[in-house]
Image (tube, helix red, strand yellow):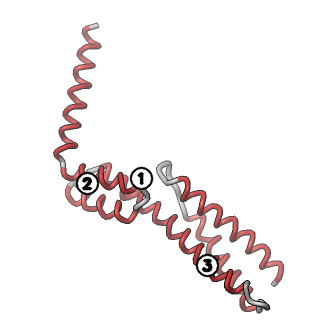
């Protein structure tokens, strides 16, 4: 019984020391702030703040994690933005009365680029599911479009 009490006291002391350390360490304060921005979807700002925290304390694991996760999320955001841009261009091409062979080749090229980039998007457990799902949906759209355009060439 006495051993359990000692373990409990040690655990409480450890928690208090950790809390005190996190409260007064400016590096960990920045890390917590960066983590907040990461989870609200502001990946670039989270990366900037986490980098600042790492400059203050290079072994700040929380900051390292936020930097890594922000970079990963930004790859997904970049892929999604490029997919939107390409789909807008394809929509303009398709809205013409007659689609030339060169336009079809251009569409096929855009599809090839997006299909080839998708496997390089490596997610982690912390990567936002909506980002992963949006990227996957764009990937499927470009695969379907690629198959249709290849048939017509």
Q: How crowded is mark 1: few (under 14 residues within 10 Å), some or many (20 or more)?
A: some
Residue drawn at x 25%, y 57% is 53
Q: How many marks?
A: 3
Which is more N-terminal, label 2 or label 1? 2
Which is more N-terminal, label 2 or label 3? 2
- Report, in whole angstroms, how far the alpha carbon at label 3 lies from the one at label 2: 37 Å
Foreground residue, 38 or 109?
A: 38
Cβ–Cβ under 8 Å for marks 3 and 2: no
Q: From the viewer's perspective, is 113 left or right of 95?
A: left
Number of the label disc, if any, that sits on residue 30: 2
Cβ–Cβ under 8 Å for marks 3 and 1: no
Q: From the viewer's perspective, is 144 left or right of 65?
A: right
Mark 2 lies on a secondary structure that is helix
Residue drawn at x 65%, y 66% is 139
Which is more N-terminal, label 1 or label 3? 1
Residue named by callout 1: 39
Q: Which residue lies furthest to the left in this view?
A: 24
Residue drawn at x 19%, y 34% is 17
| Picture quarter with the N terminus | top left
Mark 1 lies on a secondary structure that is helix
Residue named by callout 3: 86
Residue 151 in the image: x percent, y percent?
83, 78
Residue 9, placed above or below residue 30: above
Q: Residues within 10 Å of mark 3 (few under 14, many from 20)?
A: some
> Toward which corner of the image does residue 64 lie, by quadrant?
bottom left
Number of the label disc, if any, that sits on residue 151: none
- Report, in whole angstroms, how far the alpha carbon at label 1 lies from the one at label 2: 14 Å
Residue 49, placed above or below residue 59: below
Q: From the viewer's perspective, is 49 left or right of 140?
A: left
């Amino acid at each position: 019984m006495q051993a359990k009490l000692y373990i409990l006291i040690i655990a409480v002391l450890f928690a208090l020391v950790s809390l005190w350390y996190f409260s007064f360490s400016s590096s960990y304060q920045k890390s917590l702030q960066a983590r907040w921005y990461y989870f609200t979807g502001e990946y670039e700002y989270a990366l900037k703040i986490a980098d600042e925290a790492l400059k203050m304390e290079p072994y700040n694991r929380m900051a390292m994690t936020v930097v890594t996760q922000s970079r990963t999320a930004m790859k997904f955001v970049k892929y999604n933005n490029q997919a939107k841009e390409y789909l807008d261009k394809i929509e303009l091409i398709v809205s013409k009365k007659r689609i030339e062979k060169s336009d079809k080749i251009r569409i096929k090229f855009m599809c090839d680029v997006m299909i080839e980039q998708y496997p390089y998007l490596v997610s982690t457990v912390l990567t936002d599911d909506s980002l992963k799902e949006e990227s996957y949906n764009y990937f499927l759209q470009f695969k379907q479009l690629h198959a249709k355009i290849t048939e017509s060439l």
